[in-house]
């Protein structure tokens, strides 16, 4: 086992969809088989949009149950709530003072809001609270607090990890070599998982397949996948079909080769291909779904896992804070 530390934060914003899973979390779970892994539910990051504590609490359980059910290797990993670690609030305050405001102005997520406000003629900062504006500083604190080397994220978060590197560099330049420089790692599937309408699967397009949808809903969603109007006996290019592109992630090699052939030779209609896709996804998710349901009806066990994780994380984090406090305040 390498001594590199993998870290990622999972923002609790409701049930993940299979695009989130295949694009980010599957990769994290694979890494957790071989590396020391720090995984946490980023509930403080949800605060800038979700202002109902009951909702955040529920989503936090859902995300914890999800990542455990999908197989995060707890022999190598710790899992905790971001907000349970006191040191995070401290490091956030310290990093504020080495972070240029201009860096925040360059954040894609903030710029997207400015553009939206400009388009609708609103005040540029309409709807922007300071939690949102300084989001990348808190995220840098997450990354730097636990001395992480590799941060697996979706492509939308790459810039934030680069900011963490920039902030670590500003800090190191000012106070001497203190922080390790983290690297973002983007899974090759990130952003490439098609949704029901063939565009990238994303909540904002309303084209997602929730990962633990009940079977009947899963089936309904899959049947809604948009296809062209080719007939069953017409040859079809599998690599342009949402059905096949999703199937590839859930079926065995033999099944994938078989579907490719059926498409290319014009031996299957889209309806039957969708049934094959449903069976593959349903089989793949049947055990995780059971585990997920188990955890969601035993949240006391989740609390225990999260508390154990927080205890370990606190020890690591407090060491970092001691060092930083000394560097900055003497
Ligand atoms: N910002 C990430 C997201 O929206 C979640 C997150 C919070 C995170 N802290 C992090 C990811 C630290 C990686 C590392 O998905």
Image (cartoon, grey):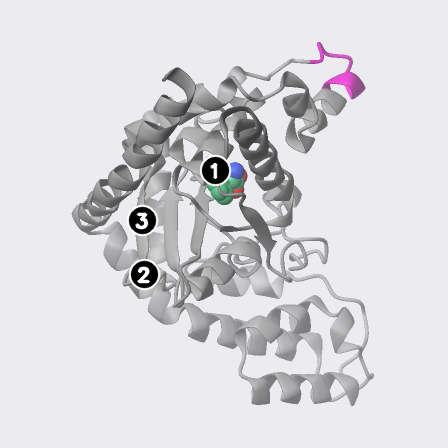
Residue at x 31%, y 28% (from the top left corner):
322
Camera-near label (3 vs 1) is 1
For the N terminus, give its image quadrant.
bottom left
Q: Looking at this view, is 115 or 312 the one in front?
A: 312
Whichever of callouts 1 and 2 sits on the residue coming sooner in the sequence is 2
What residue is shown with label 2? Answer: 76
Ligand 1 lies under 8 Å from the Cβ of mark 2: no
Q: Are marks 3 and 2 in contact (CB under 8 Å)?
A: no
Whole-number angstrom distance, CA of label 3 to CA of label 1: 22 Å
- The residue positioned 53% from the left and 83% from the top of the image is 252
Q: Residue furthest top?
A: 123
Range of the magenta residues?
Answer: 117-124
Which image quadrant is residue 101 in?
top right
**Nearest-to-viewer mark from 3 and 2:** 2
- SS under mark 3: strand
Q: Position of residue 241 (x, y in %)?
A: 73, 70
Q: Secondary structure at mark 2?
A: loop
The answer for how far apart the CA atoms under marks 3 and 2 are is: 10 Å
* Left or right: 298, with 126 as reference point: left
* Residue 15 in view of the camera: no
Q: Nearer the viewer, residue 263 or 22?
A: 22
Q: Nearer the viewer, residue 326 or 195?
A: 326
Compared to residue 210, the image places residue 144 above or below, namely above
Residue 138: tell me if it is visible: yes
Comparing 132 with 195, the one in front is 132
Rendered residue at 40%/26% (across/down): 91
Q: Is residue 79 above or below residue 11?
A: below
Label 1 C-beta lies within 8 Å of the nearest ligand 1 atom: no
Query: How many neighbours does mark 1 have within 10 angstroms: few (below 14), some (14-19), or many (20 or more)?
Result: some
The 10 Å Cα crowd at callout 3, few under 14, some 14 to 19, many 20 or more, is many
Which residue in the protein does label 1 denote?
179
């Amino acid at each position: 086992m390498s001594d590199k530390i993998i870290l990622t934060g999972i923002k609790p914003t409701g049930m993940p969809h299979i695009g989130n899973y295949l694009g980010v979390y599957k990769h994290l779970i694979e890494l957790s088989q071989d590396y020391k892994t720090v995984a946490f539910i980023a509930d403080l990051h949800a605060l800038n949009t979700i202002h109902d504590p009951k909702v955040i609490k529920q989503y936090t359980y859902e995300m914890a149950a999800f990542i455990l059910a999908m197989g995060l290797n707890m022999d190598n990993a710790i899992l905790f709530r971001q907000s349970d670690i006191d040191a995070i609030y401290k490091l956030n305050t310290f990093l504020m003072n080495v972070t240029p405001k201009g860096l925040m102005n360059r954040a894609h997520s903030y710029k997207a809001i400015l553009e939206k406000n400009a388009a609708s003629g609103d005040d540029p900062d309409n709807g922007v609270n300071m939690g949102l504006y300084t989001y990348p500083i808190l995220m840098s604190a997450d990354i730097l607090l636990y001395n992480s080397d590799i941060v697996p994220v979706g492509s939308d978060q790459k810039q934030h990890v680069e900011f963490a590197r920039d902030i670590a560099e500003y800090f190191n330049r000012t106070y001497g070599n203190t922080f390790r420089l983290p690297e973002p790692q983007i899974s090759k599937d990130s952003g490439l998982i098609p949704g029901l309408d063939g565009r990238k699967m994303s909540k904002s397009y309303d084209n997602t397949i929730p990962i633990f949808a009940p079977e009947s809903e899963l089936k309904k969603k899959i049947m809604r996948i948009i296809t062209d109007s080719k007939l069953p006996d017409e040859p079809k290019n599998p690599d342009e079909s949402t059905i096949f592109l999703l199937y590839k992630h859930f079926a065995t090699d033999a099944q994938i080769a078989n579907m490719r052939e059926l498409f290319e030779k014009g031996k299957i209609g889209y309806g039957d291909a969708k049934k094959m896709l449903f069976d593959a996804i349903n089989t793949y998710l049947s055990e995780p779904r059971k585990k997920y349901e188990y955890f969601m009806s035993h949240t006391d066990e989740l609390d225990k896992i999260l508390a154990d994780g927080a205890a370990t994380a606190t020890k690591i984090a407090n060491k970092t804070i001691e060092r930083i406090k000394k560097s900055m305040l003497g």
